[in-house]
Image (cartoon, coloured by chain):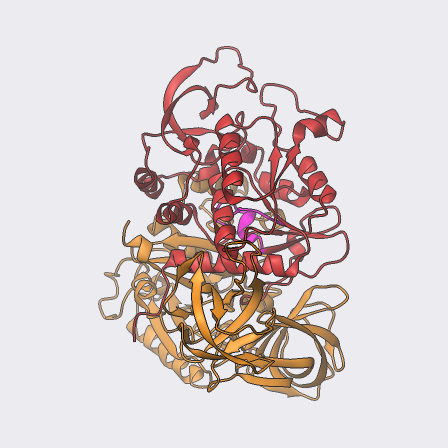
Chain colours: A orange, B red
Amino acid sequence: MSIQEKNQLLRFTTAGSVDDGKSTLIGRLLYDSKSIFEDQIEAVKSSSEKKGFDYVDLSLLTDGLKSEREQGITIDVAYRYFATPKRKFIIADTPGHTQYTRNMVTGASTANLAIILVDARKGLLEQTYRHSFIASLLKIPHVVVCVNKMDLVDYSEDVYNKIVADYEAFASKLDIKDVQFVPISALNGDNVVDRSENMPWYEGSTLLYHLEHVHIASDFNHIDCRFPVQMVIRPHTLEFQDFRGYAGRIDGGIFKPGDEVKVLPSGFTSKIKSIELNGETIAEAYAPMSVTMTLEDEIDISRGDMIVRPNNQPKSEQDLEVMVCWMNQKSLQNRTKLIVKHTTKECQAMVKDIQYKVDVNTLHRIEDIQEIGMNDIARVSIRTASPIFFDSYGKNRQTGSIILIDPNSNETVGAGMII
Amino acid sequence: MGQYYLSHLKELEAEAIFIIREVVSQFEKPALLFSGGKDSIVLAHLAKKAFYPAKIPFPLIHIDTGHNFPETLEFRDELVEELGVQLVVGSVQESIDKGRVREETGVNASRNALQTVTLLDTLEDLKIDAAMGGARRDEEKARAKERFFSHRDEFGQWDPKNQRPELWNLFNGRKHHGEHFRIFPISNWTEMDVWQYIKEENIALPSLYFSHERECIVRDEVILAKSEYLPLKEGEEIQKLIVRYRTCGDMPITGAVLSNADTLELIIEEVATTRTTERGTRADDKRGETAMEDRKKAGYF
């Protein structure tokens, strides 16, 4: 119990289609970590019986919406939670069919780790390439390839080794820092939580052991100081008459009282007087902490400004090169007007050029295109009405990401990673 | 270099505070829906931390069904006093008196569903454009698909198939006139996280959550508190039991659990070993497989 309070949080995505055993794997993790409750199991059992199944359909645990249960499909990203004595986990479970890209990008945007399932009988498929490409595009720091259904290939080491070799050859074309492989049978539980006796040749760790121990403390950028100001706190009370605090969440680097800072876009410099939360002082503030900062000098600062170090500044430009995942029925074309939301700043923007779109199954570039549609991923040039203070997405997932909003419908229509 | 990472509770806290601050920055008239339950108490605590040393810059709204536990109301008034925050009470009894809703009849009658009308009327009267609530995704399957920023149309309805994608920590609160948002800053917390946080932050709770002796009626395997709002069926008897509550809803529909846990440590131990969900004691969720989704679509909490 006391260990639990110091636990880290690991967010991971699972991607796959109905028949590669994804639901079974999630069910197995939840069940073996005792995160499924009796009344949930009872409800799923009775629903399975009603549908005439002779097995307990664990996908009914995650498919919560009426139309999903009727159609037997997952429409949306479902979030599941479980904990072990070592860590807390948030699973973003994304569906494998239509609107697939949109949902996986959504789930991947906040993930530390992606689980990619490969059916041992089938080897690498188009969807394996698609999942891996999105994991690499969204810069998920860790990928675990689970070679599932090992029980159906007689737990063969050769089959496993061939899949590993194929995947490594393919992954060399992608930008994934950390790839691990685990041979499993989600159905029987081999190497999921407990070590498999059926695969003595496998010397690596079980899936759960890996999830519990993978090093995630450096998944945030602790080098380049970035503090986007969310709002200004002015109490206007006798006791705190002159208090002027800048509230926000650290997006990068380590801030300390006494540090010299520069405020963008004004360019004024000052020193950090205090960093606090709820009146308690904080000696060092780093991502993803929410804090309130005060400065030595009175400077005009408002929402959308960014506090950085004078000797380490983000880029400040109006022309952005962005990998966009388009998420709306209405297509994106040249000169489409949008609202860009970046950290705590919003501004108008226009599409200048669609350079190419990526075939997510083959990674080929398709050039000379006039528009992109739902679930397309494309490289796009965007011009904003005022400068944005950004880093490349590869350097900082927070200051390198934008969402695109349709100014008429107000819907979120795209996600962008700044190159 | 030191260890630059947060515990899971600190990370969840940072996320929730970020969202509460986004709400105040992006909306004109936010409010916090306060039920008197532990989740909304934690939410009020997070709001206090988010704006300190300034006061919480939005009112708490309590939808009073008239069937509350007296302990809840007492606690609510003390908390409001301590935080120095405005409290608005929307009364279901008034909605009934005005003829806006019709009271259910029969032995299992409940005012749970009626709350939606009172809630939407109250939000409209106050012109609230962002109503924060303490709902969590781990509570119920329809809630597992809820966004942090959940868009509601001009009728207050939720359209689960047409939700805005939510990426990174970029939250889109743009809306047309007459629409509003429901916002769930502790979406990613589990029941265990809430209890551990209450302990770590030493947050006061209504006495209902701790083990106590109470006069009860056992109906359909649910332990209900004896109250004037709960007519007895034939053959039902009042028994004295040692119980506590895992959630805090209306008196006639919220089930208690048999428990000796009278400290936070014991409650956390109990939560860690319990084999049913906390809403498993809620009669309102047992009105069909998608009872929660149906109510949420109509504008429920």
User: Which image quadrant is residue B177 in?
Assistant: bottom right
From where the camera sits, is residue B186 visible?
Answer: no
In the rendered image, the vertical position of residue A274 relative to residue B239, given as above or below: below
Image location of residue A334, percent across then percent down: 75, 82
Which sits in the foreground, A17 or A328? A328
Image quarter where the C terminus of chain A lies is bottom right
User: Which image quadrant is residue B298 in?
Assistant: top right
Image location of residue A360, percent across then percent down: 57, 78
User: Which image quadrant is residue A165 in?
Assistant: bottom left
In the rendered image, the vertical position of residue B263 relative to residue A330, given as above or below: above
* Left or right position of A367 against B98: left
* Left or right position of B90 against A56: right
From where the camera sits, is residue B72 visible?
Answer: yes
Residue at point 50% right, 48% down? B43
Which sits in the foreground, B84 or A395? B84
Image location of residue B271, percent across then percent down: 36, 41
Image location of residue B198, percent across then percent down: 39, 45
In the rendered image, the vertical position of residue A175 relative to residue A303, given as above or below: below
What span is in magenta?
B130-148
In the rendered image, the vertical position of residue A166 relative to residue B56, given as above or below: below
Residue at point 62% right, 85% down? A317
Q: Is residue B146 magenta?
A: yes
Q: Is residue B149 magenta?
A: no
Residue that lies at the very extreme toward the top in this rendered image:
B235
Count of number-bearing discs: 0
Residue at point 36% right, 69% down? A216
Residue that lies at the very extreme toward the front in this rendered image:
A238
